[in-house]
Amino acid sequence: MAPAAATAECRQALVLALDVSGSVDSIEYRMQLDGLAAALNHPEVRRAILAMPQAPVDIAVFEWSAPDYQRHLVPWTSVTSAGALDGIIARLRGTARTAAPPGTALGSAVRIGGAMLDAHPGCWIHTLDVSGDGKHNMGPHPRSLQPWLAARDITVNALVIGVDDPRQGDARQDDVAGLSSYFRAYVIAGPGAFVETALGFADYEAAMVRKLLRELEGLNLATLKPDNPLTGQ
């Protein structure tokens, strides 16, 4: 799929950053990508994304693990039509896993996603969505990025993938509440930033639908910028 050319103005630039660290096995990896594809194809999400083709949503997707591992899955695509959205969905469904190093470099993921947004001007809102199933354990700490993000009006939301009762030896030794509190304290940033939770990867699709609708439905007609700031028309 060739990426659609970015428009001169969009209502939201949205980067989705997916955790593929060592705690994510091959089955969970597939559930994450297919879950995101299915969430983007959900009727209500499709309706929200395509609601304003004159001021579309621009989407990009990458996966991350260690500080030096970021793999771009979907280049910046301006979703001006159903066909453009279908192209993103097909690309996600057709993506095969490649070897990724262990480690959970949340700060590095935030820095890369933030840099992508900073280099993508012309959008009213810039949002980074970070999915993760564990705490930062290498690279820059995510809280160190807070001033940099604030200076660029970048919002960081999170989708936490947790388990209620971690198995002995499970790399994810935090329950949903504990991991959500960690992301709330150190990862999310910007006015109105929030944490959505998924009870394991089986719940990822439903959680992603909830998160996308919460983000997209806030961009209603009240968000439209007047052509003439003096007359409001």
Image (cartoon, rainbow, N blue to C red):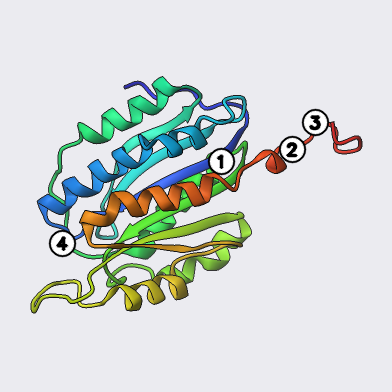
Depicted 85 relative to depicted 195: above or below: above
Q: Residue sitting at 27 percent across and 45 percent down?
A: 35
Can residue 125 be seen in this snapshot?
yes
Q: Are marks 3 and 2 in contact (CB under 8 Å)?
A: yes
Location of mark 2 (residue): 225
Q: To which residue does mark 4 refer?
A: 22
Instruction: Look at the numbered discs 1 and 3 and tell me whether their residues touch, using CB distance below 8 Å.
Output: no
Query: Which numbered circle lies on residue 189?
Result: none
The residue under label 1 is 12
Q: CA distance from mark 3 to mark 2?
A: 6 Å
> What's the residue type where badge 3 is placed?
Asp
- Quote the CA–CA distance across marks 4 and 3: 49 Å
Type of the residue with mark 1: Gln
State the mark number for residue 227.
Answer: 3
Where is residue 39, by image quadrant?
top left
**Mark 4 Cα shell of 10 Å, populated few (<14), some (14-19), many (≥20):** some
Sequence-first tag of 1 and 2 = 1
- Which residue: 61% across, 55% down? 153
The N terminus is located in which quarter? Answer: top left
